[in-house]
Image (cartoon, helix red, strand yellow):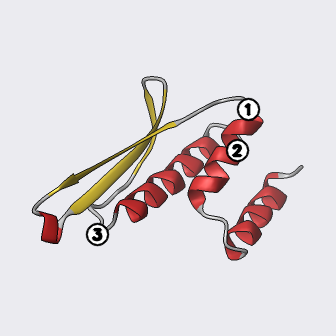
Amino acid sequence: MSRGFQQVQQSARLAQGANHEQLLMERLNRYSMRAKNMTWGWGPHYDRRWAGSFWIGSVKIGASRWWLMSKDAAKEDAARDALLRLDRHGYH
């Protein structure tokens, strides 16, 4: 499959309701790899900010770029970053 076709497929899956975390897990399963998600929050309970990252062993493959308002948004941003990194390293 061509890389362009795979990107079109990924965009179509996102439009159908799949999220970046699901796409990341599917891609890692294709290569028999497992990633661990870590999220952490800072601030008072009424104004908590979240960050997240995905790891394979001791290698960070993706991280959220901003301090986000929700834990799910931080995980989703970290998964999106991990997918981009996997693309750059040839794991399509």
Residue drawn at the location 80% of the way across and 63% of the way down? 9
Tell me the SS state at disc 2: helix
Which residue is located at x 79 percent, y 59 percent? 4
CA–CA distance in space, label 3 to label 2: 27 Å
Q: Which residue is mark 2?
A: 27
Q: Nearer the viewer, residue 17 or 10?
A: 17
Q: CA distance from mark 3 to mark 1?
A: 32 Å
Q: Are marks 2 and 1 in contact (CB under 8 Å)?
A: yes
Residue 16 image point, x, y percent: 73, 74
Mark 2 neighbour density, 10 Å: few (under 14) some (14–19) many (20 or more): some
- The image quadrant where one finds the C terminus is top right
Q: Which residue is mark 1?
A: 31
User: Circles 3 and 2: CB distance less than 8 Å?
Assistant: no
The kind of residue tagged 1 is Tyr
Name the residue beneath numbered marker 3. 69
Q: Position of residue 66 (x, y in %)?
A: 30, 61
Nearest to viewer (mark 3 / mark 2) = 3
Q: Residue furthest bottom?
A: 15
Can you tell which of label 3 and label 1 is closer to the viewer? 3
Q: Check disc 1 and report its element: helix, strand or loop.
A: loop
Q: Residues within 10 Å of mark 3 (few under 14, many from 20)?
A: some
Residue 47 vertical position relative to residue 52 in the rendered view, above or below: below
Q: Which numbered disc, 3 or 2, marks the residue that appears first in the sequence?
A: 2
Q: Earlier in the sequence, mark 3 or mark 1?
A: 1
Amino acid type for the residue under numbered disc 3:
Met
Asked if the residue under mark 1 is in contact with the one under mark 3, i.e. CB atoms within 8 Å, the reply is no
Residue 27 falls left or right of residue 1: left
**Image coordinates for residue 3, horizontal then vertical, percent:** 79, 52
